[in-house]
Amino acid sequence: MGSLIATKKTKAVLQNESESEFWLLSDIHFLSAKLHDNGTAFNKFAEGAAGKEMLYQTESLEAFVAEALEKRPTGVILTGDMTLNGEKASAETLAKLLAPLQEASIMVLSLPGNHEIYNGWARIFKEDKEFYADQISPQDFKEIFSEGYEKADSVDQTSLSYSINLNDQYRLVLLDSCIYDEQVNWNQPNTNGRLKKTTLEWLKEQLEAAKQQQQTPLLFMHHNLLEHNSLLKEGYVLDNSAQLQQLITAYQVPLIFSGHIHIQDIAEGPAGVQEIVTGSYSTQELGYGVVTLTDKAINYQKKVIDLDQWAAKNKSKNSQLLHYSAYQAKIFQQDTNHMVRQQLASVTELTEEQISTLCTFIAKMNTALFTGDDTYSQDEKETIRHSEEYQLLATYSYFLKQYVDSLLEDNSPDNALTLSIK
């Protein structure tokens, strides 16, 4: 993809304000309505979409845009997997939905996820059939989500990474952590991520520039730097995270933001770096992150779009939209129930009543994981481990017992963080 030559734009900062606010949106998995007819093939796909809500994506994004236009943050940062499976039409439609933000001088900065570039799963759904859809090339990505590249202080010529010279206090570095082919691909996308050697060299230049200008560097990428759950490591944590950790430690990067695992979580690394994963905007709730940057502190707060309220305000007659939070939660619970029943399919000793109870038990814990409400006290952990449901899992399903154990590992709050800046 070319030689290692950073494209220099300008050394001027983007803003002179001492305070800025960015909203983080991750893992939208948006499918343009142009690509399906709500027919048999689409509905069959939607039923197996891992808890994603597929029918009201346009409305949920319109509600997000309306909220942003009212609150007027400095910008919105999308940390990958914006499209369902890298359909070019989905990217174009999404860009149009977000365009009112740019018209209101709210920046839209984007980086790719593992679903974006040359994804062989890109599909059009028509009646009972699926057809190949046009895929997104790296150049398409730069053109469709152009604002970040236009405002960049430096662009890595070997990936879709770029650096934003925000103000005297902060430099934002958006990293392309994805592995993809150089041409149209007919296979499944790579789930795992890695920063190229050349991208790491470019990143070092950006961190050095931040150091020279006495700026605090903040990193954004799709894949995770740290392990956030013992069962969500392979394919989720960056393949060469140790190399990135070394750079982060050397240049005292305080914070990194990511997505990919769909759960809301905050973790601290061995060198003190904090990583915030903003949950998926397509599962369980319409969650997004609000990052406030001042000359004294960085504050992060998870927020949720109330689509029920938005629908009522817009005088919708659609009962699912008017009760969207319950509808979305039902889809997520149905997916969890399906997973539990699959795991217990070969167990003949359990009654239907016991299986149903186990579905409810795990669905409650799964919801807490995805929404970042999974911090349990020691007493709560003991209560869970001594419960009848846990004992049944310990007897009949090693995987589900192991899964519940992994959900009890989190010891820190996941929905808010404040870091002081020296």
Image: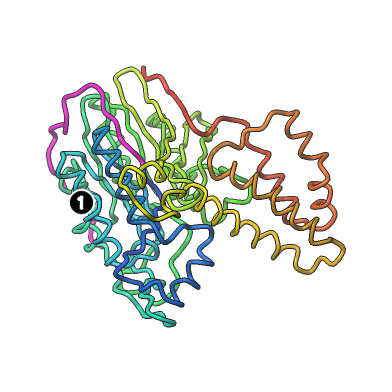
In the foreground, 77 or 304:
304
Q: Which residue ends up furthest to the right in the rendered image? A: 349
Task: Give the residue drawn at x 41%, y 32%.
Answer: 255
Q: Residue 169: x, y in percent?
A: 26, 24
In the foreground, 77 or 216:
77
Query: How many numbered discs sit on the rendered protein?
Result: 1
Q: Residue 249: x, y in percent?
A: 44, 32
Residue 144 appears in which quarter of the rendering?
Answer: bottom left
* Secondary structure type for disc 1: loop
Does any portion of residue 73 appear in the rendered image?
no
Q: Residue 248: x, y in percent?
A: 41, 35
Q: Is residue 307 left or right of residue 336?
A: left
Q: Quadrant of the C terminus?
A: top left
Q: Is residue 375 left or right of residue 139?
A: right
Residue 318 appears in which quarter of the rendering?
Answer: bottom left
Q: Is residue 276 left or right of residue 413?
A: left
Q: Residue 88: x, y in percent?
A: 28, 67
Q: Give the amino acid type for the residue marked by disc 1 in the picture.
A: Ile
Does any portion of residue 150 appear in the rendered image?
yes
Q: Quadrant of the N terminus?
A: bottom left
Q: Eyeballing the image, is 252 above or below 136? A: above
Q: Eyeballing the image, is 210 above or below 225? A: above
Instruction: Please name the predominant secondary structure of the magenta segment in the image.
Output: loop
**Does the magenta segment cover residue 18?**
yes
In the foreground, 62 or 392:
62
**Does the magenta segment cover residue 142?**
no
Task: Give the residue drawn at x 83%, y 39%.
Answer: 386
Residue range corresponding to the magenta coloring: 1-24
Q: Which residue is mark 1?
A: 5
Q: Eyeballing the image, is 39 above or below 221? A: below
